[in-house]
Amino acid sequence: MERYSDYDDFAQVYNRHWGGFSIRIIPILEQMALDVCPPGSAILDLCCGTGQLAKELATCGYTVTGVDGSEKMLRHARQNAPNANFYCADARSFSLPTDFAVVLSTYDSLNHLLTLEDLATVFHNVYRHLQSGGVFVFDMNLDAGFRSRWAGSFSIVADSSVVVVDARYDEDERLATMTMTLFTPADEDNTLWQRNDVTLTQRAYSVEELTETLAGAAFSKIEAFDGRGDFAMRDEGRAFFRAIKR
């Protein structure tokens, strides 16, 4: 399994500053899948990060499993969602004994897969882990989202972390790069701080590429939704997808 060491370095800061996105979109997930999913149903949170969504789903009575490629992300997830089960595995090759009613992958996690071949492998693997009639829901940054939100620099300063972010998008290559310099305490007294430099890359895919790749993995009833137009999100260029296992 490929290890995601860059995400390990990012885990503490992600947990503090970015983990809440998936909670904010729970009303969207309810509309797309959860409203017809009774408590007790098995749900997979794929690329679960630090487990904030898993916590909310478990609180709602679902049987929740989380998969992520970063062990340090999962350390936070196990603390945040002690009633869920977590596994460190690659989204392309994970193998679990459970068939799930719903598989969710949120916060543009699948944009981190940089080829359609890798995405297709993930889609086939998700299909294999769904019950008949099961639902796969995920969101992606599209080209417009990268052009509007991955441009320029910003910083976050908090008591226990400093983050300096530089985001760039290459429209020709459809590759987005986020370079982060992270400063976090190295001791309990906050007298020594450590620096980590992290670079994360995402690729933009078109709606057509994604729907065709889902169809190639045997999914049916494939639908794409615009986050702003359909769900009144502020984000431009974020799409949500729903697909059903035949």
Image: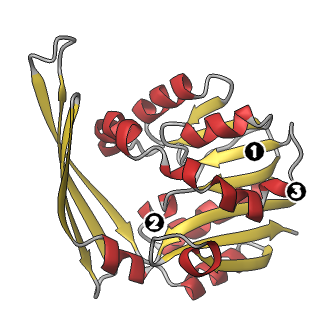
In the image, is residue 236 above or below residue 64?
below
In the image, is residue 180 above or below residue 239?
above
| First of labels 3, 2 by sequence position | 3
Other-residue count near label 2 (Cα within 10 Å), few / some / many at <14 / 14–19 / ≥20: many
Of helix, strand and loop, which one carries label 2? helix
Q: Residue at x 65, y 38 (%)?
A: 56
Q: Residue 183: image x %, image y %?
A: 16, 35
Q: Residue 6: image x %, image y %?
A: 30, 44
Q: Residue 171: image x %, image y %?
A: 29, 85
Residue 208 position by quadrant: bottom right
Q: Residue at x 72, y 34 (%)?
A: 58
Count of labels in the image = 3
Q: Which residue is mark 2?
A: 111
Of helix, strand and loop, which one carries label 1? strand
**For the residue marked with disc 1, what is the amino acid?**
Ile
**For the residue marked with disc 3, what is the amino acid?**
Val
Q: Residue at x 9, y 16 (%)?
A: 191
Q: Is residue 154 left or right of residue 49?
A: left
Q: Which residue is mark 1?
A: 43
| First of labels 1, 3 by sequence position | 3
Q: Is residue 166 visible?
A: yes
- Circles 1, 3 touching at the beta carbon (< 8 Å): no
Q: Which residue is mark 3?
A: 36
Q: Is residue 91 visible?
A: no
Front one among 226 and 104: 226
Front one among 211 and 23: 23
**For the residue marked with disc 2, what is the amino acid?**
Asn
Of helix, strand and loop, which one carries label 3? helix
Other-residue count near label 3 (Cα within 10 Å), few / some / many at <14 / 14–19 / ≥20: few
| First of labels 1, 2 by sequence position | 1
Other-residue count near label 1 (Cα within 10 Å), few / some / many at <14 / 14–19 / ≥20: many
